[in-house]
Image (cartoon, helix red, strand yellow):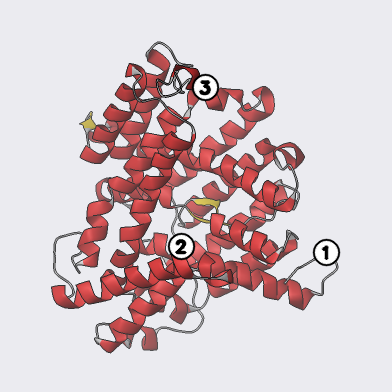
């Protein structure tokens, strides 16, 4: 379906529904993992996309929704400070994007490359995935965060591994739009098996009203929770730049110039802060939707308006949200075994693609210390001023990059390669 500016509204709406369908699996999975309300996540994804379109003058065909990069700090800060404080940290993360957009407008993008070269950002991304891997394994085995066996081990393994295999097969062998929705297909397979094993209680779904307000929640601002969020916000900011370049390559437009990177960063920041004010997860541009744009050649940004409106409408269907929250632990665990590993591989690929030379001592130090601090859960400080895990390792990586000499020597020089000589 090739949607143009002159297409009738019904066709634009259908294309928008298709884009939301592509994003849906990842959109609702993130709030389910972190204990947020999926209906609120749908609402804030739609609202965030609309705000992004306003800021960018409706020029960029992207859809914004739940960011997986924030899972680790949200889980950590939630346990220590509570969900309202987490939401305050999300609002602050959006402010980071807004400040970055102002800096880009004034100074260009060069300072981002100096502050966050691949040798800094790559190990942080790896930590985001690897630090969460025990959670994925426990969920796949039917064990919740407190260590309680919620679903029998044998049943959990059958469901989680079937979910994982289905997701893998669709990702590798799928064609057309199916290849863009492996998470959604995996959830469908896992839920179907869960129904067969009779581990889904439909009582709550039957009792839920068809129309209900999402469970909005106001943020509280707590310095400790904010410190969890701010360093992690830098990784999605870099991801955002890559996403804008990617959609520009697909459509043949240079969005870094028009509407400008400062506007797209501002739009992302406004969307993320708005999500925090309503009780939703931070937003980011979805590469799945970029893939759908490339496949269907739907270049008209209006289709994202329709996707956003449909997401907001779905947010007010009470039974829909309760059904999402009824998805069993092993189903999510099976998908997360792939998802968290994939996040780590993105970081590894960043090192390889940018030819980061780990034989250079400064590079080796930055990557090594960052990985150990992030995966091991190192903690510095106490109480409100404590830094731990991903937040700490991100700050340490940036500081080491700024302090250690030879800041421009992170990349391998091919002429010094002994294989070339």
Q: What residue is shown with label 2?
A: 26
Identify the secondary structure beneath mark 3.
helix
Query: Rounded to the nearest whole Å, what is the CA distance between mark 1 and mark 3?
Result: 40 Å
Query: Rounded to the nearest whole Å, what is the CA distance between mark 2 and mark 3?
Result: 32 Å
**At x 65% / y 64%, what residue is drawn?**
295
Disc 2 or 3, which lies upstream in sequence?
2
Quarter holding residue 151: bottom left
**At x 27% / y 45%, what residue is drawn?**
131
Identify the secondary structure beneath mark 2.
helix
Horizontal and vertical percent position of residue 303? 71, 65
- 225 or 168, which lies in front? 168
**At x 38% / y 73%, what residue is drawn?**
166
Q: What residue is shown with label 3?
A: 114
Local crowd at mark 3 within 10 Å, few (<14), some, or many (≥20)?
A: some
Disc 1 or 3, which lies upstream in sequence?
1
Horizontal and vertical percent position of residue 209? 45, 84
Q: What residue is shown with label 1?
A: 5
Name above or below for residue 187 compared with residue 260. below
- 151 or 220, which lies in front? 151
Local crowd at mark 1 within 10 Å, few (<14), some, or many (≥20)?
A: few
Quarter holding residue 370: top left
Along the horizontal axis of the image, is 337 left or right of 99?
left
Query: Rounded to the nearest whole Å, what is the CA distance between mark 2 and mark 1?
Result: 28 Å
> In the rendered structure, are the residues bearing label 2 and label 3 in contact, judged by CB atoms less than 8 Å apart?
no
């Amino acid at each position: 379906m090739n949607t143009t500016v002159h297409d009738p509204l019904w066709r634009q709406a259908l294309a928008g529904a298709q884009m939301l369908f592509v994003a849906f699996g990842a959109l609702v999975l993130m709030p389910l993992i972190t204990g947020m309300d999926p209906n609120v996540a749908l609402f804030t994804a739609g609202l965030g996309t609309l705000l992004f379109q306003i800021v960018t003058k409706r020029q960029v065909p992207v859809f914004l929704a739940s960011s997986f990069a924030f899972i680790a700090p949200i889980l950590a800060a939630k346990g220590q400070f509570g969900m309202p404080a987490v939401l305050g940290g999300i609002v602050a993360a959006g402010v980071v994007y807004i400040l970055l957009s102002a800096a880009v407008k004034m100074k260009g993008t060069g300072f981002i490359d100096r502050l966050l070269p691949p040798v800094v950002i790559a190990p942080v991304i790896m930590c985001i995935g690897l630090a969460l891997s025990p959670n994925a394994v426990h969920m796949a085995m039917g064990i919740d965060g407190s260590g309680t066996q919620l679903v029998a081990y044998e049943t959990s393994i059958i469901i989680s591994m079937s979910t994982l295999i289905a997701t893998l097969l669709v990702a590798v062998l799928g064609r057309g739009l199916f290849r863009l929705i492996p998470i959604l297909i995996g959830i469908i397979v896992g839920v179907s098996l869960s129904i067969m094993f009779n581990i889904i209680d439909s009582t709550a779904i039957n009792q839920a009203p068809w129309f209900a307000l999402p469970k909005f929640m106001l943020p509280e601002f707590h310095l400790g929770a904010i410190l969890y969020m701010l360093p992690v916000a830098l990784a999605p900011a870099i991801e955002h730049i890559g996403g804008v370049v990617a959609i520009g390559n697909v459509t043949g437009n240079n969005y870094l110039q028009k509407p400008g990177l400062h506007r797209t960063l501002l739009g992302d920041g406004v969307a993320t802060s708005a999500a925090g004010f309503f009780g939703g997860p931070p937003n980011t541009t979805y590469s799945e939707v970029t893939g759908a744009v490339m496949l269907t050649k739907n270049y008209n940004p209006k289709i994202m308006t329709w996707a956003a409106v449909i997401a907001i409408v779905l947010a007010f269907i009470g039974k829909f949200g309760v059904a999402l929250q009824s998805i069993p632990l092993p189903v999510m665990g099976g998908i997360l075994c792939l998802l968290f590993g994939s996040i780590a591989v993105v970081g590894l690929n960043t090192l390889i693609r940018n030819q980061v030379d780990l034989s250079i001592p400064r590079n080796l130090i930055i990557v090594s210390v960052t990985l150990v601090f992030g995966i091991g859960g190192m903690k510095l400080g106490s109480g409100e001023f404590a830094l731990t895990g991903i937040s700490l390792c991100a700050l340490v990586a940036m500081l080491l990059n700024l302090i250690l000499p030879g800041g421009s020597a992170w990349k391998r020089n091919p002429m010094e390669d002994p294989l070339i000589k």
